[in-house]
Every structure is written in structure tokens, then in C-alpha cells.
Image: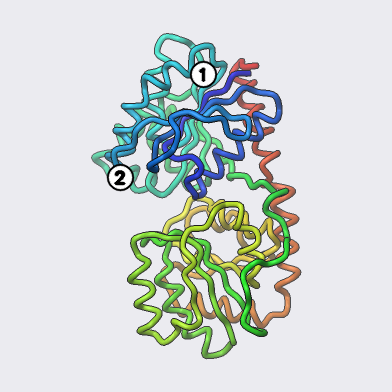
Amino acid sequence: MKIVQHCVYFPPEVGGLESHVHYLCRGLARRGHQVTVVTSLSRPGLPAYEEMDGIRVHRTPLPSRTPWGWFAHAAGSTPRTRAAVQGADVVHAQAFPSILPCSLALAGSGTPLVCTLHTSHFLRLAANPLVAPALGKLVELSDYNFAASKEIADVGEALGPSISVETLVNGVETEIFRPVEGTHPRAGRRWRLVVPRRLFPKNGVEFFVRALPLVADRADVDAIVVGDGPDREMLEGLAGELGVAERIEFLGARPHAEMPGLLCSADLAIFPSLMEATSVAALECMACGVPVAASAVGGLPQIVDDSVGGLFPPGDPKGLAAKVLGLLTSGGLAERGATGRERVVAMWSNERLVDRHLEVYGGLGVG
């Protein structure tokens, strides 16, 4: 089967969408399918074409990392997409900005178009009454829709009476994300918390920093934050103001290959998000056997409960601190980590994701 996927970002970019598309495409390629990705020249020095893990990757210019830039990239990528879809059996738009170039490239061909709705950006736009009607028309262009969480699926279906969306939680490459020896040095017998979040307001890392003094008052802890973004300077300053600068280390963005060792350096992973789809990063922590405490927003309650960690109210440092302290003192972290690993392998592995995509492609008369 010849499969073409379109997405704004792709590795070496790091993030949930990027890893989802990468591992899905790699899984499809390993099943013997020809997989092509059209994405962006998101960093200086990236090649316009390369082959990665059996995937043919084409990159076209990205003017800026903004909604305007995404749509400009989508429009500019249409000629490259049109060339890629020649003879394709199915085309898959990964996120709503990719629907239009895929639809234009397929005009008159009869090739089915699949879309996956990702991210909080989709939720924000769908909540705007001026934008929602056009967004609904866009989603109606696809023949089949997935969503990364039930919240996104429900919002997508509300955009139009003819729109149907299947919830399909993103998958994890469980052979890569698994319990391994921790790679980040630890300070004595301190508890270690890890916050694998990009430093943008929606990810709520500020509330973790504000909670850290409350946790440190009652437990000997330190924390590592893995990810970068525009909030970094503010967060480092806030940690200093609150007297916890020596207890928190901002590691910046790290290559995907380093993540299992960094995650396994911790006793507990924290996701203080204010908005969230499903969070591939939370699933990766669980696959590594690390229990997860997360805010009760978006798709996080679909994957996190008391058996693998627990939930706390979003934007609430006291609630976050209480949940973390309860988990650290419960004596059940190892059991929760093992349960999380078992659950991801059973329900959210990348192999399961590949299987379901091939079922849907086949149901559209493909392959």
C-alpha cells in the first residue's frame, strides 16, 4: 500500500504529535507499506528530502511557528503534496492544517483522505464562533476522522451534523520507552520528580514550580524539567524567588533517544497542564514504569487514574502538592509504575495503533 502523510512538524522536532506521526509511519513501513511524509523545513540545515526509518520525508518552507505560519506552510506545500499523492492508496492529514493541502492535492482523484485531530490549538479554534463554521467545513473534507482524545472527538463532531470522529489515543513505542537504568545523577536519597513539558503557558509548569516549596516543606525532593520554551526565564526566576532554585534543574529540550533514561531517573512524573489532548509524554512515562500525577484536563483522565498515579485540579499548586505528597508517602509507587507499563502495552502500544490504522484504511477500500 502507498500511504502519504502530511504534518507540519516531524523529527528531529520533539513533541507528542511529532513522535506519534514518526512511530506510526515507521510501524507502517515495517509492515511493508510505502510511506511518504510531507512536512516542513522547521529548522535551518534540514534536508528537503531524506529517508528516515524507511520513511520518505519531503520538507517544504515554514514561514513561522504560528497559526498563520502553519497555514502558509500548508498552502505552500500543496504542489509537493500533489506530486507525492500520485498513485497513493490513502492520504492522511495529521492535524487540521494539513486537511486543505491534502484535499487540494487529491482533487478529482477519488483517493480517500483520513484526518487525525490533535492538540489544544484545535480546541481553541473550535471554541471561537467566528472560526468554528469554517473549521467544520474543513473537517468535512476528510473521509474518516480520528481524534487523540474523547474531548477532541466530541468537539469535532459538534462542528457539523455529518462529522463522525473516532477516539484513538496516541501510541507509544514500548520497546523504546521501557524501564531502563536512570541516566541523570541523583542527590543522595532525595525523591526525584520529572516534568517532561515544553515551557509554554498551556503546559502549566508555573503551577508545578509554585507547588514545589509546599512539597519540599514535607519531603526531601528535587525535580528535573525536560523541555524548553518562552517561559523558561520566567520559571527559573520564579524558582529563585520561591527559594527552590537548588531543588529544580531545567535541562532544556533533549533528543528523543535520551528520554527513557531521563524519565527512569525519577520516582514520579508530573503533568500540570492547563490544556491537553492525550499527552504522548504521559504515556511514555507510564511505558517506562514511572507513575504519573496529572491535572484533570483534556484527555489526561482517559489514561491516568489512582492505579497509575493520580489526578489533581488544574492551576492549583496546593492540590498538586497534596497529590504529590500523597503519592510519595503512600508506599505504592513501584506498583503504580508497573500497572502503568502493563496498561500502555495492552491498550496504547504503537503496534495497536498501526493495526487500527490499517483496519480503517482497508475499510475505505484501500490495500
Nearest the camera: 63 or 21?
63
Q: Which residue is mark 2?
A: 66
Image side of residue 232 versus residue 280, left or right: left
Total number of numbered discs in the rendering: 2
Give the residue furthest to the bottom: 217
State the image coordinates of residue 173 (x, y, percent, origin top left). 67, 46
Residues packed near mark 1 inside 10 Å, few (<14), some (14 to 19) or many (20 plus): some
Q: Residue at x 64, y 79 (%)?
A: 328
Q: Residue at x 72, y 65 (%)?
A: 181
| Residue 144 visible, this angle | no
Q: Which residue is mark 1?
A: 112
Mark 2 residue type:
Thr
State the image coordinates of residue 25 (x, y, percent, origin top left). 60, 33
Nearest the camera: 131 or 254?
254
State the image coordinates of residue 19 (x, y, percent, origin top left). 55, 45
**The quadrant where residue 269 appears:** bottom right
Q: Dividing the image into 4 quarters, which one contains the C terminus? A: top right
Relative height, residue 192 to residue 164 (above, below): below
Residues packed near mark 2 inside 10 Å, few (<14), some (14 to 19) or many (20 plus): few
Q: Residue at x 62, y 82 (%)?
A: 187
Q: Earlier in the sequence, mark 1 or mark 2?
A: 2
**The quadrant where residue 136 appears:** top left
